[in-house]
Each structure stands twice: as structure tokens, then as C-alpha cells.
Image (spheres, rainbow, N blue to C red):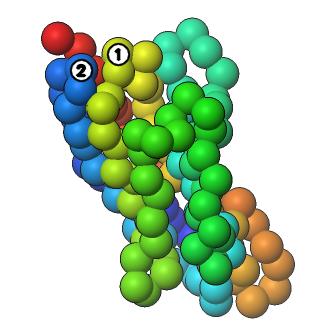
Amino acid sequence: QVQLRESGGGLVQPGGSLRLSCVASGSIFSINAMGWYRQAPGKEREWVATITSGESTNYADSVKGRFTISRGHAKNTASLQMNSLKPEDTAVYYCNAHVWNGISWHVNWGQGTQVTVTS
């Protein structure tokens, strides 16, 4: 069993910043890529950013230049620094991780953390 737990969501005004964190725990031999996705009300879940084990990063065009994804030293954590937030960034943000449990690879998801950007 692998658990991912997000934290750091909240309410912020436009132009503000938030930092989301994700911690993976459980039956983990190694983690390859970790990423962040988001889902706004009435919309499908969309990809936001990914970071590989080699710390290569990719971002959706909508957040490029405003969001920064990073991995922790222990490699089982990932953070998403969100700056210059806009109302359209309002969504539930989910962390995911590609985990090797010693037998097979699995994509695991957290429960999500709410980010609301409003004045």
C-alpha cells in the first residue's frame, strides 16, 4: 500500500502565493516521476506539472512561469510553489507518483487539497 498526502491548500487573493506539499509513504522501493494535477468544478482533471527522479520538470502552458515543482531530498516528497495566482487556478489539486513497490510500477494518487483564489 502506498499513500500520498497533500497539504498546503487554502484561500488566497489573486496575485498571492501558496505552496503545496505531497508526501508519499508505504511500500515504496523507489519513485520515478511525481506530478500535480488539478480539477476545477465541472471540468475534467488536468495535468499541471511533472518532475522526474532526475529532476527534469515540465509544466502546462497555463502555469508556466508562475508555478515551480520540486522534489525533496528524500525523493518521496514533492512541492508545488504557486505564485501570481489567478481565479482560474481555483481547483482541487492532486499529487501523483509513479511508484515501484519491488514487483511492479503503479501510479498512486492523493486525496487532493483545495485551492481557492478569490478576492
Q: Amino acid at mark 1?
A: Pro
In the rendered view of the protein, which quadrant contains the N terminus?
A: bottom right
Q: Which residue is mark 1?
A: 87
Closest to the observer, 23 or 16 = 16
Query: How many labels were placed on the picture?
Result: 2
Classify residue 106 as left or right of residue 91. Answer: right
Q: Amino acid at mark 2?
A: Pro
In the rendered view of the protein, which quadrant contains the C terminus?
A: top left
- Check contact, mark 2 vs mark 1: CB within 8 A: yes
Residue placed furthest toward the front: 65
| Up/down of 40 relative to 69, above or below | above
Spot occupied by residue 58 in the image (x, y as percentages of width and height): 64, 53
Classify residue 103 as left or right of residue 72. Answer: right
Classify residue 7 as left or right of residue 95. Answer: left
Q: Which residue is mark 2?
A: 14
Mark before the other along the chain sequence, 2 or 1: 2
| Up/down of 101 relative to 42, above or below | below
Helix, strand or loop status at disc 1: helix
Quarter occupied by residue 27? bottom right
The local crowd at label 1, few if under 14, some if 14 to 19, many if 20 or more residues have their Cα within 10 Å, is some
| Up/down of 75 relative to 111, above or below | below
Disc 2 to disc 1, how far (Cα)?
6 Å
Q: What residue is rendered at 62% in x and 38% in y?
A: 60
Closest to the observer, 38 or 62 = 62
Spot occupied by residue 39 in the image (x, y as percentages of width and height): 54, 27
